[in-house]
Image (spheres, rainbow, N blue to C red):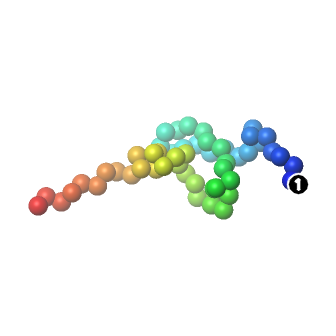
């Protein structure tokens, strides 16, 4: 069985929307290099809202 890592030993990044630090998660294992937001909420808040075309 692999040796457990302490949470403080995991890599961290800074969210580009809220500016808070977040740590590596198992579900981000394959694409950690592309992760830029700490949550779905920040990802959706970072995109500008689409305006509907006038009818």
Report the number of discs.
1
At horizontal 42% and vertical 50% (from top left) the residue drawn is: 44
Q: Report helix, strand or loop for mark 1.
A: loop
The one nearer the camera, 30 or 13, is: 30
Indicate left or right for 13 with 52 as reference.
right
In the image as oriented, which residue stretches furthest toward the front? 1
Other-residue count near label 1 (Cα within 10 Å), few / some / many at <14 / 14–19 / ≥20: few
At horizontal 63% and vertical 60% (from top left) the residue drawn is: 31
Indicate left or right for 4 with 53 as reference.
right
Residue 47: x and y in percent read 39, 52
Indicate left or right for 33 with 43 as reference.
right
The one nearer the camera, 9 or 3, is: 3
Residue 24: x and y in percent read 67, 48
Residue 12: x and y in percent read 66, 44
Residue 46: x and y in percent read 42, 48
Image quadrant in which you'd find residue 29: bottom right
At horizontal 71% and vertical 46% (from top left) the residue drawn is: 11
At horizontal 52% and vertical 38% (from top left) the residue drawn is: 19
The one nearer the camera, 12 or 39, is: 39
Image quadrant in which you'd find residue 28: bottom right
Q: Which residue is under mark 1?
A: 1
Q: Which quadrant: the C terminus?
A: bottom left
Q: Which quadrant: the N terminus?
A: bottom right
Image quadrant in which you'd find residue 15: top right
């Amino acid at each position: 069985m692999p040796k457990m890592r302490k949470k403080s030993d995991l890599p961290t990044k800074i969210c580009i929307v809220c500016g808070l630090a977040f740590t590596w998660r198992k579900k981000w294992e394959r694409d950690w290099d592309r992760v830029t937001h700490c949550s779905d909420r920040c990802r959706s808040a970072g995109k500008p809202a689409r305006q509907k075309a006038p009818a």
